[in-house]
Image: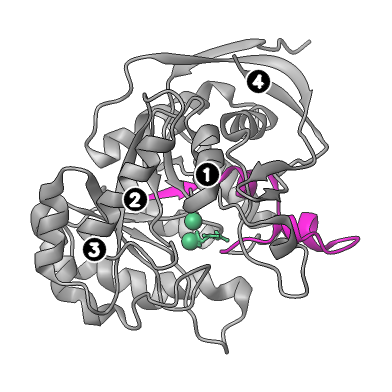
Amino acid sequence: MTSTVDTLTITRPDDWHVHLRDGVQLKDTVRDISRYMGRAIIMPNLVPPATCTQTALSYRERIMAAQPQGDFTPLMVLYLTDNTTPEEIKKAKASGHIVAAKLYPAGATTNSDSGVTDIENIYPVLEAMQEVGMLLLVHGEVTDSAIDIFDREKIFIETKLAKVVAAFPELKIVLEHITTKDAVEFVEKASDNVAATITAHHLLYNRNHMLAGGIRPHYYCLPILKRNIHQQALIAAAISGNKKFFLGTDSAPHAKDKKEAACGCAGAYTAHAALELYAEAFEDAGALDKLEGFASHFGPDFYGLPRNADTVTLKRSSWTVPESYPLGDSHVVPIKAGAVISWEVV
Ligand SMILES: NC(=O)N[C@@H](CC(=O)O)C(=O)O
Ligand SMILES: [Zn+2]
Ligand SMILES: [Zn+2]
């Protein structure tokens, strides 16, 4: 007989990678993320992107105004371009609300057209970040159209990231939403200044879920779901208790018609049930006891922030995920739409 746990109380979690979008969508995304997450790292890939201190701070004000309760803390991120200056980094850091800057290789993902064309262009900026203690967050994929989409993360690590890590040993770097065994191994071997976030959907799914028996656009995100051996490596990393791996949902809503299209957008929505989805993944791996470190301790520890002081409780309880949720003037189809989830945050 195996004993099953029916309630689990953990330190309040944070989400170290989320997309809240802007405008009419903000009330919906902020309501979902602030239900039980204490803080979240807010991705800056808006249209136009949040490339300077002023735009990041006014975005923060809109998020603060959109939250129903007022106890959620958005941690802001500057979007790096070829034109970002070291002065802007210092200004952002001094604002007290911007904790990191995000490297999107130009063209790698949703709204990354203004991203960095060659990382060496921004070495003076990385130098300034290392100096003032601002974290570098990385979308780790090469953009060369000749490189197979399933290899883009691995090749980015080998040809780009390894050089940055070597050139800036004191810079804290988070390789975001990792999807491969190669990324897990790179992060494990790197210094303590290198960490990674892992999404719930990359723990729960592999490319068969997206492509076998019909193409399912709501599983399409970047970096793309990989084969099963990579999913297994991500699960092993997440439940290992290694403090370099922590929670980042990469919840990234797109309206239903933008996903169910001839050329559908990349991004999966998980903020409706973020912790519940991770709980399912950890339970499937027989490691519910490892959820708290991953969801609530290792992220703030890496960012040099205090852990949340209060707790949340997950209860075993089956509920059916709605087919869609409102998203501004449209709708988003969430992960597990119409399916049953067996945990609920009370
Ligand atoms: N993950 C995604 O597939 N999409 C994200 C961008 C990103 O995080 O790469 C989005 O903003 O939609
Ligand atoms: Zn990304
Ligand atoms: Zn993202």
> Residue 201 placed where, x, y %?
64, 47
C-alpha gap between disc 3 and disc 2: 11 Å
Q: Reading the chain from its start, which is encountered first: label 2 or label 1?
A: 2
Q: Nearer the viewer, mark 3 or mark 1?
A: 3
Q: Earlier in the sequence, mark 3 or mark 1?
A: 3
Name the secondary structure under disc 4: strand
* Residue 159 drawn above or below residue 173: below
Magenta stretch contains residue 196: yes
Q: CA distance from mark 3 to mark 4?
A: 38 Å
User: Circle 4 sits on which residue?
Assistant: 344
Residue bearing mark 2: 59
Residue 123 in picture, x, y percent from top left: 18, 75
Q: Nearer the viewer, residue 279 or 46?
A: 46
Can residue 191 be seen here? The reply is no
Q: Are marks 2 and 1 in contact (CB under 8 Å)?
A: no
The magenta span reads 194-222
SS at circle 2: helix
As drawn, is 31 to the left or to the right of 273?
Answer: left
**Nearer to us in this view, 184 or 199:** 199
Disc 4 and disc 2: Cα gap in Å? 30 Å
Q: Which mark is residue 249?
A: 1
* Amino acid tagged 4: Glu
Q: Which residue is the site of mark 3?
A: 52
The answer to which quarter of the image holds residue 113 is bottom left
Q: Amino acid at mark 2?
A: Tyr
Residue drawn at the location 70% of the way across and 44% of the way down = 334
Q: Residue placed at 23% from the left, 63% from the top?
A: 52
Q: Residues within 10 Å of mark 1 (few under 14, many from 20)?
A: many
Amino acid of disc 3? Cys
